[in-house]
Every structure is written in structure tokens, then in C-alpha cells.
Amino acid sequence: MLVYAILKYLAYVGWCAVLSVNYSRDGVRTLRPWRMGLIRIAIGIVVGLSLSAAGMHLAFGRQFLIAWTSVMIPVRWLEWSLLVIISTGKTFSLKRLLLGFDLPLRLWQAGGVLVSFLTDGAMIIAFGVLRALIC
């Protein structure tokens, strides 16, 4: 589990660096990538433990991977949206949380969702099991 958390953190820091470098060009200051990575991991732990405590992983049965992915895509979108709000200081609104802010940030958020799934895939390949405690 520790290897998984470290892998997630490093992947998140790398992806947050993309935001920091590209978005700061437009005059928007962001938190440092290492800090955004920590916040993203914290969001993921809280959400992951909440979903696990609610028994989400037990509800999917034989269609686990399809059902889990269908649920996790919007969950992870919301997590990355929340990170944008926190790291850029943008004003919170439900519309922005659900739809994103602008095209560059929406693309970055979609990439973040992909990064989240790729790190899960790496864990499945390395350990043969998926324990989604960090979203």
C-alpha cells in the first residue's frame, strides 16, 4: 500500500507540475506541485476511505471493473476540480466544480483523471490486485 501511495503522489506531483508551468504563463499563480500533490492525495484518501466504508466496492459484484470505472470517472473529475479551486484560488461554484473552468483546465482535469487510472493500472500489473483506497 505504501508503494501505491508513493506512486500516486509522484504521478500527481508530475501532473500538477504541468498545471503549475502552463497555467502560470497566463498570470495565474498556483500552489507548488509538491503541495498540490499532497492535497490531491489527501482528497483521494478521504474520498477513497469514504467510498470503501460505504461498501461501494462490494456493490459491483461480477461487473466490478466496469461499474467501478463508471463511478470513479465522475468522482475523480470532481476531485481534480476541487484541486483546481484550491490550488489556483478560483472562486468556488457548483457549476465550476461539475464542468470545470475553461478549456485548458478541463483538459488538465481530464488528464488528471487519466493519471489516476494509470497509477491504478500500474498497481494491478505490479501486485495483481486493486485496492482503491486512494482515489
Image: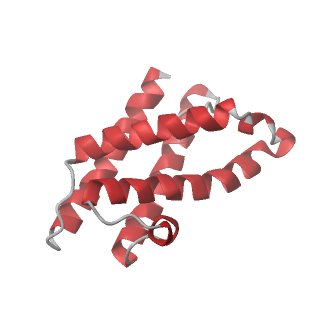
For image coordinates 84% across by 39% down, the residue present is 61
Above or below: residue 132 compared with residue 1: below
Whether residue 122 is visible: no
- Residue at 67% x, 30% y: name it: 53
Question: For the point 63% across and 33% down, which residue is it?
Answer: 130
Q: Quadrant of residue 2?
A: top left
Seen from this angle, which residue lies furthest bottom? Answer: 103
The x, y position of residue 39, in whole percent, is 35, 41
Q: Is residue 20 left or right of residue 68?
A: left
Numbered marks: total? 0
Comparing 15 with 102, the one in front is 102
Task: Identify whether 75 is placed above or below 60.
Answer: below
Residue 45 falls left or right of residue 67: left
Place of residue 77 in the rendered image (x, y in percent of width and height, measured from the top left): 51, 59
Identified at 81% across, 42% down, the residue is 60
- Whether residue 43 is visible here, answered yes or no, is yes
